[in-house]
Every structure is written in structure tokens, then in C-alpha cells.
Image (cartoon, rainbow, N blue to C red):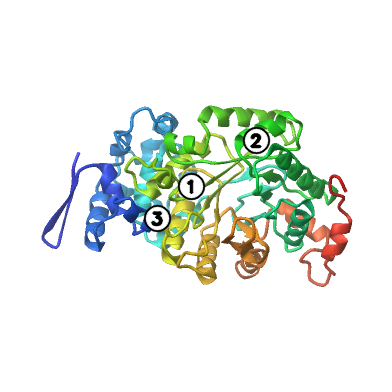
Amino acid sequence: MPYHADLNATRYSFPSLKVLLARASPERSGDVLAGLAADGPLERIAAQHALADVALGDFLQDVLEVGGDSVTDLIMAQHDAAAFAPVAALSVGALRDWLLDPATTGADLAALAPGLTPEMVAAVSKIMRAQDLIAVAAKVEVVTRFRSTIGLSGRMSTRNQPNHPTDDSRGIALSALDGLLMGAGDAVIGVNPATDSLPDYIRICEVLEAIRTQLDIPTQSCCLGHVTTALAAMAAGAPVDLVFQSVAGSQKANEGFGITLAMLDEAAEAVAGLGRAPPGAHLMYFETGQGAALSAGAHHGMDQQTMETRAYAVARRYRPLLVNSVVGFIGPEYLADGKQIIRAGLEDHFCGKLLGLPMGVDVCYTNHSFADQEDMDILLTALAAAGVNFVITVPGADDIMLNYQSLSFHDAQFIRQTLGRPPAPEFAAWMVANGIGVPGVSQPSLAAALGRVRLPGS
């Protein structure tokens, strides 16, 4: 059905909800590249006005207009009519007002999450300013557990990312220990492997397991290889804590990643069967990012932010320990500059939290983007205010394997010290017990810590 808005004596018409969502999106280069963006600020404002008047029930009809898409089927199967009932009569604009109402609590939002579809959440985000996205996300507490408890209000966890360009075991260990001595790694110690070979995957898991067990760290580790490699590694007896996979918002985009929902189901069952975690622990880890579906030609005419939010339906199927948007990683073709990256990071965090996910963000950009570390400072601080579950940290903010800029271990310390966001309680206690970051207590040197760890094969 068509949607209309009158602005400055001009009538703007949008032939479908899909088009309306795209035109209402804050400006970003990916939508321009795809020919989906508004033709200027007036059409964008008109689309936002029209979108605010759309009934939430319209999103249960034909948003994507794609038949036979497993993600669309999953979204409809996940929809909980009883949870949706309190807001079923609202428009998108009225939902925004309800979310921002001080009387609406985090418990209210948690109860609503199963009733919301990704398209509803994406829609309301498009008519919210940055402070709105922060204020609502800050109400939501999504807590997950393995060896550490992640997502408690007033805390911020970190992923310690010790990538190495050749997956050298000692290089990974040095980088991981550097981060640990800065208090990084309570969410996960996670390595992106330089290759996706099975022997490499197993060796990295063994290196991370040696560090964790010999230093008795209350955290979990992950080699971020493809889910098929993880399945083979688990079958071979590798010490796998978390199964990782990048996911996207359409079946075609996920097929581009070489995955299906059935494959993820198999992996979730396999990792649970290892018995490495306490009962009820969360065992999956997913990454997403605006532009993934567009870059694969699998966006079906949908704007990149709405497609990103649809990926969260895939993630929440598996009760993950961690989910994060790698917000600026794909490049300026999709998020051109610091302003677009900041906006996208706040959107992704808000949308994931509102859908009930333990949402983190890789605050990052590529070297050919019009962005810099000051933009990342702003996004990091805004996300901390919004209650982000975790962020990703690397030595010196420079990932020497993936060749992009992220956050440093010191950046996380800045948030801990200025905004009072300690790590997970179990990890914080481990730090105190080991004299890490404790005033008046000499911190162990990197050499001393390394000397206590015996790596596999050494």
C-alpha cells in the first residue's frame, strides 16, 4: 500500500513500506550506492513523518516482499502475539514516545522484545535522534553467562582480540597477555584466524585454552573461524568454548557466508554437547554489520540498516553469549565517514538490545574511510552511556591482521576510569587477586606472565 506525507505544500508518496523505510533512513553511503536513499533532506524528513504514522501491525504483512526466505520465515515464527499486545494498537511514532516515557522500565522492554519484529525496531530507530537511542538502550539489561557474567547494568565488558598476521602462537599469546594486564578480555579472548584451515583452528583453540587454564582466568575463548571448521574441530576434540559465525538478514546473504539455519542448529547442539560450560550457559557468538547483505547483492531492495536488524532475528534464535556489530569494518562504500559510523553504531546497539540481544559493538573504521580515532572516542563514550554489553579491543587500536582501526586496551580503561564501568564481577575479582589495576600493588610484568604460560608444542 502507498504511504504519503505533505511537507512545505508538497506531497511525497512512497509506494511500499520497504521504500518508505529506505527513504526514512538517516543518510548513509550504502543506501545511496544501492539507489535506495532519499533524494535529499526534504524527502527524508517527509518519509520520517509518514513512517511515524504507520501502524505497527503493518509490519506483520509484507515488508520484505520476498518469498521463500528463511530469515523472513524465522521472523514471523518468532513473533509473540501476547508480548506484542501492549503496543499492538500503536503507530511507530507512538512506540517511540512509549519507549522514551520514564514510566517504561527495562523490565517492560524485556517483556516486549519477543513481540517486536526487526522491521518494527528498525522503523522506530529511524525517527529517533542519537540521545533517544542512548536513553532507551540504557534501560535494557541483557545478561548472559558462561564463566563470566556479561551485561550487568553499570558494567562494560571487553573482547581481547589478539590477532596475528600469521597466526603465530607466541604472537597471539603476547598480544592476549598484553590485553589481560590491561584488564581486557572478560567477555572473550577471541582470535580471527588468518586462515580457515582446521589445524590452524585447533592450534589457536589450544593456545587460548592454555592461557586461560594456566592463569585461571574466568573468561571464555573463541577462534572465529567458519562454523563448518568449528564443527570439524569439535569432532576432533578441540577445546571449543564458543562457536562463532557472521550472519546477515536474508537467506541469500547467509548463503553467501556459506551457512544455513540448519548448519547453525547443528553447531549449537554440538557445542552444548561438549559439556565445557555450566548448565544454562550461553555458547554462541555472532557478528553482523551494516552493508553485509548489500555487498553480497542479497538485500532485496531493503535499506542496509533494516537488513542489519533482520540479522538479529537469526542471532536471537540461539540465545548467544555475545553479538556485536562490526560497525565500520566493511568500508566507506557503506558508511562513508565518522558521522555515519557513529549513527550506525548507536542504531545497531539500540536495535539489538530492543530485540533482547546481548549487544556489543566493534567501534572501528577502515583506513580509507573519512573517520579517525576521535570519532571512535565519541562512539565509544556514547555506547558506554547506552549500556553496551562489550566492545572489542586490540593492541594500540590497530589490528595488524585485519588491517583496520578499532579500540585499544587503553580506550577501555578510559571508560572504566571516567564513567565507572568495571568488567564482569568474576573477572574483576581475578584482576584484584592478581594485582592487576590495583592501586599500590605492583602489576606483574608481561615477561613474568608469559613465563608462567606453557604453550602447546613448546
Query: Which residue is labeled 2 in the image?
Result: 229
Q: Position of residue 56 (x, y in %)?
A: 31, 41
Q: Residues within 10 Å of mark 2 (few under 14, many from 20)?
A: many
- Nearer the camera: disc 1 or disc 3: 1
Image-based side of 219 in relation to 124, left or right: right
Circle 3: residue type? Leu
Q: Disc 2 marks which amino acid? A: Thr
Q: Quadrant of residue 69?
A: top left
- Residue 100, numbered circle: 3
In this figure, which residue is indicated by the disc labeled 1?
352
* x 51%, y 30%: residue: 261
Q: Are marks 1 and 3 in contact (CB under 8 Å)?
A: no
**Proximity of marks 2 and 1: CB atoms separated by less than 8 Å:** no
Q: Which picture quadrant has residue 162?
A: bottom right
Along the line of sight, the residue nearer the viewer: 21 or 35: 35
Give the CA distance from mark 2 to mark 1. Answer: 27 Å
